[in-house]
Amino acid sequence: MNIILLGPPGAGKGTQAQRIEDAKGMKQLSTGDMLRAAVAAGTPVGLKAKEIMARGELVPDEVVVGIISDRIEDADCANGFILDGFPRNVAQAEALDVMLKEKGKQLDAVVQLEVDDAILLGRIEKRASETAGGPRADDNAEALKKRLDVYHAQTAPLIDYYSAKGSLRIVNGMADMDDVTRQIMEVLER
Ligand code: AMP
């Protein structure tokens, strides 16, 4: 089974993706994690992405599309994958459609974690104060707010995109973490 976890920054996509990975043996593919690894390793992709990520903006589509296109063919994705943080805009979603078709793969569900902005802003302030000086250059209040703006402007249109295709499944991301996991498992088993 191949799925997308869709939701704003701070919605808990990473945590839930790990839980699905553990429960279902599907592979979590986080473009954010892969980009952070590239930045840490100082690869050409990392050098290109570093400042953009620190500002909370999106790295160029061709960079992330290339990463995902290579990655979904790896052996550890044979049992399915969970896209966490990709696609981030309609152009990436269209590129994903093309690449899946070319590779003879399909998307089984798009799970949207729905969380109100007021809750996210609260989490953002908390995360910024807890993680100051930590490993993520974009975990400061300014970059986090920018990421939320980018989500609304560029990523939220994917809700309509996948809704029109009939693949959208909505989960209440404001419930406690275990309940969100239960809701996700339920929609995946439907
Ligand atoms: P994340 O860990 O998913 O919050 O991603 C952290 C940062 O990595 C984002 O704010 C972007 O700068 C970059 N990034 C991650 N995934 C993508 C993507 N699919 N397209 C563009 N930029 C991305």
Image: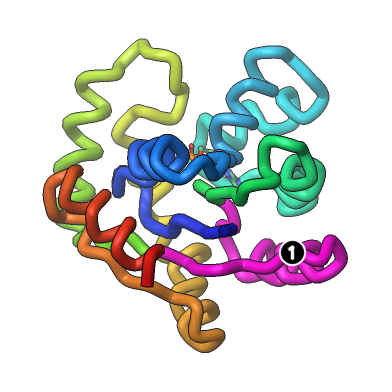
Split into 4 quadrants, where in the image is the N terminus? bottom right
Split into 4 quadrants, where in the image is the C terminus? bottom left
Q: Amino acid at mark 1?
A: Lys
Residue 89, how many percent across, how many down?
59, 64
Please state the quadrant of the image where ligand 1 appears: top right
Residue 100: say if magenta. Answer: yes
Between residue 37 and residue 151, name the one nearer to us.
37
Above or below residue 92? Residue 176 is: above
Q: Secondary structure at mark 1?
A: loop
**Residue under the point 46% across and 83% down:** 163
Residue 45, how many percent across, how many down?
77, 30
> What is the residue that sits farthest to the bottom in this orientation?
164
Above or below residue 90? Residue 7 is: above
Q: Quadrant of residue 168?
A: bottom left
Residue 145, how many percent across, how many down?
34, 45
**Residue under the point 55% across and 30% down:** 33
**Residue under the point 55% across and 36% down:** 32
Residue 14: say if magenta. Answer: no
Between residue 170 and residue 139, name the one nearer to us.
170
Above or below residue 173? Residue 52 is: above
Task: Name the side, left or right, on which 39 lies relative to 82.
Answer: right
Which residue corresponds to mark 1?
105
Tell me if I can see residue 38 in this picture: yes
Total numbered circles? 1
Q: Quadrant of residue 26?
A: top right
**Residue under the point 53% across and 49% down:** 82
Above or below residue 87? Residue 140 is: above
Tell me if I can see residue 153 in this picture: no
Residue 183, how many percent across, how many down?
24, 60
The stretch in magenta equals 85-111
